[in-house]
Amino acid sequence: MSLLTTLPGIGSSTVSPVPSPDAPAQARPVRSITKVLEPLERLARDSRRLVGTSHAQVRIGDQDYSIPRYLYVGRQGGGDLQRIGIFATLHGDEPEGVLALGKFLQTLEERPEIAEGYALFIYPMCNPTGYEDGTRHCRAGVDLNREFWKQTTHPEVRFLESEIWMQAFHGIVTLHSDDTSQGLYGFVKGSVLSEYLLQPALLEAGRYLPRNHGAVIDGFNARSGIIHSGYPGMLQSIPGMARPPFEITLETPQKAPLHRQVDALVAALQTVLVENRYLQAIAQNI
């Protein structure tokens, strides 16, 4: 059975329209976090390599929410495991990322060699209230992807910052979709390796969707779909690190068919792992 068909209200003709931010809160349909996470939970129960670690409990308004966290431990490679953090649904109206992560992890179950030498820390639902409401912002009305490393009080960001700090990732990948773009593109920051990983990832994802070749994308100068700057407060590693991890943000065109966005993100994630392992092997032999 297709991943998309197992998720009621996602990728089918029954999907509810995203409500206007000005609509009364009581009129907004609440989307089920439990249902969208079902494929991941099922994989975690059945897999020998994927575990659903204890989800973070955060207080948002007058309700308690979980921010789910999964760990996929690949087969041992030739050295220490590379720790990669993968984040999705920072904007609640972008379900493409969480759907792609379900299919990506299913692919790793079938082809474990892709993740050899990796420990993948998966955060598929970073903005639970925004997802429930179908809104970009969290229920407090804040864009969480502008709050990182700003001494924020928002519990979702504080938890993710603590994970970035404690896990000391070798790489960070964030999944987004953009309703103003007609093609794929991405942001790079951190290690010089970032661009060398994003370029082949976009190339592989281009089997499913076109690339945005505009000279200006999302207000930033771009070249071949790659942006070297970013928004203040976007999810990233700890500022000022002497040896930062590679940091990639992948953006799909949200108006494209959902299944193509999912396939493009899965292809890009696989490529990042394969290319990074290759580059690490070259570095060890220099």
Image (cartoon, rainbow, N blue to C red):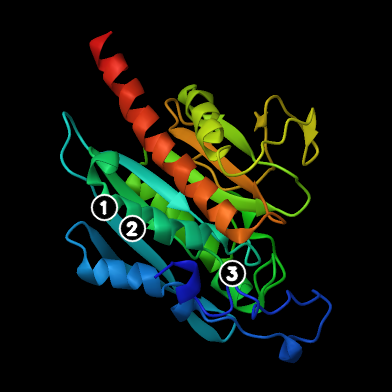
Q: Name the residue under label 2.
A: 106
Instruction: Give the structural element (helix, strand or loop) at label 1.
Output: helix
Q: Name the residue under label 3.
A: 11
State the residue at coordinates (30%, 15%). 282
Q: Looking at the figure, which quarter contains the N terminus?
A: bottom left
Marks 1 and 2, how far apart at CA: 7 Å
Q: How crowded is mark 3: few (under 14 residues within 10 Å), some or many (20 or more)?
A: some
Q: Position of residue 99 (x, y in %)?
A: 49, 62
- 3 and 1 marks in contact (CB < 8 Å): no
Q: Where is residue 170 in the image (x, y as percent from the top left)?
A: 37, 36
Question: Along the polypeptide, which appears first: circle 3 or circle 2?
Answer: 3
Residue 224's place in the image compared with 253, above or below, is above
Amino acid type for the residue under numbered disc 1: Glu
Q: How crowded is mark 1: few (under 14 residues within 10 Å), some or many (20 or more)?
A: few
Q: Looking at the figure, which quarter contains the C terminus?
A: top left
Tell me if I can see residue 197 in this picture. Answer: yes
Q: Mark 1 points at which residue?
A: 110
Q: Which mark is residue 28?
A: none
Between 64 and 227, the residue placed more toward the observer is 227
Instruction: Give the structural element (helix, strand or loop) at label 2.
Output: helix
Tell me if I can see residue 240 in this picture. Answer: no
Q: Position of residue 6 (x, y in %)?
A: 45, 75
Q: In this view, does 6 lie to the left or right of 10?
A: left
